[in-house]
Amino acid sequence: MRTPMVASVLAGLLSLPSAAASAEAQPAQPPAQQAPAPQQTPEQRDAAARKKLEEDIARELGQGGAKAPAVQGQPAAGSQGQPAGAAQGGTGGNPMARLLLLPDVSAIGSFAGALDTYDVEARSPREGLFGPRYRPTPIFEEVELGLQSVIDPYARADIFVSFTPDGVDVEEAYLTTLSLPAGLQIKAGKFFAPFGRQNQQHPHLWDFVDAPLARNRLLAAEVLSGPGVDVAWLAPLPWFTELQVAAQNTAPAPEDEERLTGVGRLLQYFPLSEATTLGVGLSAARRSEATGAFRDLGAVDVYLRARPLASRSYVTLQAELYTRKLRNVEGESGTGGYAQLFFRRDAYWGYGIRYDRAPAAGDAAPGPEHRFGAVGIWYPSEFQRLRLQISYDRAPDGRDGVEALLGLEFGIGSHGAHPF
Amino acid sequence: MKTFRMNRIALAALLVLSAPARASAALKVVTTTEGLAALAREVGGDRVQVDSLSRGIQDPHFVDANPMLAVRLRNADLLVDVGLDLEIGWLPPLVNQSRNGEIQPGGARRFTAASAVQVLDVPTGPVSRAQGDLHPGGNPHFMTDPRRVLKVAEALAARLSALDGGSAAYYGQRLQDFQRRIQAAEARWEKELAPVRGRKMFTRHRTMTYFFDWSGIVSDGELEPRPGVPPPPSHLADLVVVAQRDGVKAISVENYYDTKSAEVVSRHSGARIVLVPGDVGGEPGVTTYEKYVDTVVGRIAGALR
């Protein structure tokens, strides 16, 4: 179903190189010869003639006279194709040539230590980091291997392989188009569903050591993700407005069967001032569970970021509300969410607090489970951080407990930057 | 095969319908820094509309990859960046988000200023982050050297002319005017710098390599023992000893950096702290490249005299 779609897009893209080649083959008018003149200027005449020639060539190449706007306005032939900083090499060429073609390679390791004063598995079952009651537990969380590069002038690839105690998994591996027209961008492969804010972030982007309960309980045990296609449209508006529609196979829990899921998301960012930005996202997803049975998900997310321009410190407020409705499927519908405030004091220290609310699970009585957490982060450099998170958890029946998590994370190699 | 053809036609139609309106009006030039924006204004005059993604008061290494900036890149006719990984932490995701394929590195509408510059501090031995957060391609802070900036302006004029051939003569004229003004100013700057040539000073980060190369002032060390690494007391103590031994009179600190370590060294060694704007726009009144160099030269020469 989605393979032909990708193929057709690729086929369309593949038609571009020939057009590009034909455009480049045109000798450019040396600027010096273009003297201004009254009425129709020579430039306009040249432009008209050149346009006609391009159409003729396109016709000869079998492109129905349609020209590819993606190559409009090329600079004069000869000014391209030379990598920036190209210089005369020594004899024998560049011995590093093969290295230059390697993709960016990075590895991010995360380890944790957990200490719980309550039986998490029975009372508050969740994916993530916890240990048996009153027993300090070291945990190997993950090593994420990243391979990132442009594929060709038309697309890039990002591959993240995750090594965990459960084994090896391709976390994400997708192609992203770079030059589709009309503000469109297509992502194809396996990727995190464009649903909510945190679901699209790898754990090393989180301020807190673990995911909010509500994400675990309502969206997916780990992350809502799977193979599929995502089309994102950047609306031609003066502020950032992106509409995403994705079709992908997801399995909310490891034991679930992969099923087709439609996801939609509208994300907007508004500049409130030079130093303050507000992001608001609305997401919806429907997973077909069986004939006439659906799992419907909805989310609202808010992200407010204030950072004085000349400073490294910032404050962010991030909140998400999730709701799940099960139609003709066993299980419970529910609502939950979290809100967190984070203060990055300087390059080296950051502090956050979080409130978390989700439908209780395990042997707890039905009702909302609450969690209050605080995190302190030390960044010895940009490439590692040490986090201490203390959370207080209260089940609907009043039973409570405390958890301490110590997280260590480091990154090596070149890992592509992330939008905030 | 047939479906492929159909799809190709459909895609071609889509491409035509959505052709970005690159009107004959002013070229939209987006730069990563205000210094580059100032150069684009000098060369482009009223035929370009210039927009800088960061402000001169910001540390260009640490700009937020705010998606709002991707919106500004979307219709850019030309993206001018410094290069040498200065903007590595924020520019690539914005360019990817922008949907503007031609401003990708190496693209027809991307001009990386470093490509016009003879780069210094290029690591020759093995590179690792044990050496701090260094720039493996070389030092990107070349805007402090007017000679190199003229090279950038020249290459920028050539690129603008390539994109907008009709205005080539205009850009050439503007470039000449700019060159003439900078060369005249250079005579003035040289007079200010002559008495302090050969004197030694400290900098906070290795931002002044090109300034030293041009001015003849000599670096006696950086407050950061390694790029991006905060100075431990032992390193600052070493600097105090060096300052007393060599008669270091000044410590330059870009105004977006914290001055705490500079104050300590200053207190113990008597060297004066010279706060300088990091770029054009780094201070009120520093609105052009010429004024930026005026400010930096004036303050540093003043402190070293």
Image (tube, grey):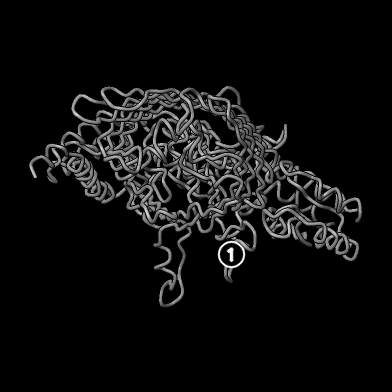
Q: Position of residue A262 (x, y in %)?
A: 28, 30
Count residues near mark 1 (Cα–Cα under 10 Å), then give few for <14, some for 14-19, many for 20+: few
Chain of the residue under the numbered disc 1 shown in the image: B
List x then y, in percent, for residue B165. 39, 41
Work out whether A200 lies above or below A30. Answer: above
Q: Is residue B181 left or right of residue A414?
A: right
Left or right: residue B211 versus residue A184 is: right
Looking at the rendered structure, the number of numbered marks drawn on it comes to 1
Q: Quadrant of residue A276?
A: top right
Element at badge 1?
loop
Q: Is residue B269 above or below residue A400?
A: below
**Residue located 7% across and 41% down the image:** B2
Q: Position of residue A372 (x, y in %)?
A: 61, 30
Query: Which residue shows up at 47% across the image and 44% down it?
Result: A202
Q: Amino acid at mark 1?
A: Ser
Residue at the (57%, 51%) spot, across then down: A112
Provide the residue designation for mark 1. Answer: B128
Residue A323: image location, x then y, percent: 41, 23
Can the viewer see residue A319 in this picture?
Answer: no
* The quarter of the displayed image where residue A275 is located: top right
